[in-house]
Image (cartoon, rainbow, N blue to C red):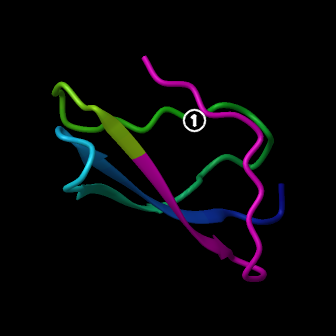
Amino acid sequence: AERKLKFSIEVSEDGENFKQVFDGMTTAEEDVLEEIKIPEGTYKAVKLVLHGTTTGTWNSILEVKFK
């Protein structure tokens, strides 16, 4: 809970051309699901691009849920 994950989210309507819809970091001080709103749409693919943490270059994701 001491580290925050830096990441971006990209979406694609055709599975080939992606556009970034989020660039930031986690905010929770504990391991809980966080809600990140992205523009509504019909997406064929979602890409998580990981940029390390506030303490290093490695990444760790516990769970991702799309609704």
13 or 67: nearer the eye?
13
Q: Is residue 49 above or below residue 55?
A: above
Secondary structure under the numbered disc 1 in the rendered image:
loop
Tally of numbered tags? 1
Looking at the rendered structure, the kind of residue marked 1 is: Glu
Residue at image location 38% in from the left, 42% down from the top: 46
For this view, does 51 lie left or right of residue 63? Answer: left
For this view, does 18 lie left or right of residue 48? Answer: left
25 or 63: nearer the eye?
63
The span shown in magenta is 47-67
15 or 3: nearer the eye?
15
Q: Is residue 33 above or below residue 17?
A: above
For this view, does 46 lie left or right of residue 51? Answer: left
| Residue 57 at x, y percent in the picture | 72, 81
Residue at image location 16% in from the left, 27% down from the top: 41
| Residue 1 at x, y percent in the picture | 83, 54
Q: Is residue 6 above or below residue 36?
A: below
For this view, does 67 lie left or right of residue 37? Answer: right
| Residue 54 at x, y percent in the picture | 69, 77
Residue at image location 77% in from the left, 40% down from the top: 62
Residue assigned mark 1: 34
